Image (cartoon, grey):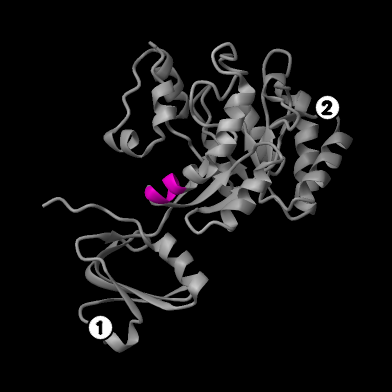
Amino acid sequence: MRFRIEFVIGFLLSFATLHAEKISLVGATVINPADGKVLPNATVVINGDKIERVAMGRQDAATLGKQIECVGKFILPGYIDTHVHFFQSADLFTRPDGADLNSVRPYKDEVAWIKSHIDDVFARYIRCGITSVVDVGGPMWNFDVRKKANATAKAPRVAVAGPLISSVSREKLDLGDPPIVKIETREQAREFVRKLAEQRPDLVKIWYIVDKDHPVDSFRAIARTTIEESHAHKIRVAVHATELETARAGVEEGADVLVHSVIDKPVDEAFVKLLKDRHVILCPTLVVFERYGRTFSHQLNLTPEEQAWGNPEVIASLDVTK
């Protein structure tokens, strides 16, 4: 018999908090990734916004409050998606700076569609068992997305950064509220961080892009100033740096998070030690670059789950043969 896995804790915790009542999930199999234990026929007692206890076997019904039958289901902590951008839909039209398809779908229409489907995105996260999401950079309306999520029961917890502090510009993404802002001086960096701090961001994001016209050291002082000013406001800093030396520079200057793996060469032991010594979080984004290649080479093979749970309009756009 095939059991359908349900991820219910995040939603029910939100429900219980709103209604301040005790709820018990009865009869499920509980999986605890922290210690590796699997508890069959378990009861999870939620009191307000806290998990009061998890126990196996028969429980005293008088202590359980409202009971929800969960036999045949699995309960585990909600997943965390640590690298998303709400201003991007994942369809073919969402990054005209990389693939300009304005002649097919104007970018302003793409952004309007994205804004009108935020609730749908929230619901799909919950459906997939993702109860926390980190948006690592986008337009200033990112902060409206966080506010909306906080006011929506069927939504994940959302942490956001504002516009990316960048070594390069991306004019094709600028509709008046740019997601990427080129910063050219240390004073500009300080002023922009102070502007972001007014919105109480969860992170400040640096887009550390290097090429022949923008070598690593040309932006390093601005990165340092951005990190210093952010830390002065008690805000952590995430850095996009996909080259080994750029990533090394970002961490040496005080970055708290690297939002991608290094892709230009194998990392060395000194870099690994640097990350460990500085307690830096690295989000590997293992498939993001691969999926670009697969999409444009007609080799994108979505899993049955992706087909079932992804937005059908977005998925349809990925067929580049049409």
Q: Which residues are magenta?
A: 123-127
Disc 1 residue type? Gln
Predominant SS of the magenta segment? helix
**Vertical order, 301 against 249 (above or below):** above
Residue 187: give its label: none
Q: Say what secondary structure mark 1 lies in.
A: loop
- Give the percent coordinates (x, y) of residue 309: 35, 39
Q: Quadrant of residue 27?
A: bottom left
Residue 86 visible in this rendered orientation of the protein:
no
Disc 2 residue type? Glu
Q: Say what secondary structure mark 2 lies in.
A: loop
**Disc 2 target residue:** 184
Q: Quadrant of residue 206?
A: top right
**Disc 1 target residue:** 59
**Vertical order, 318 against 203 (above or below):** above
- Residue 168 lies within the magenta run: no
Q: Nearer the viewer, residue 20 or 218?
A: 20
Which one is in front in this view, the residue at disc 1 or the one at disc 2?
1
Q: Residues within 10 Å of mark 2 (few under 14, many from 20)?
A: some
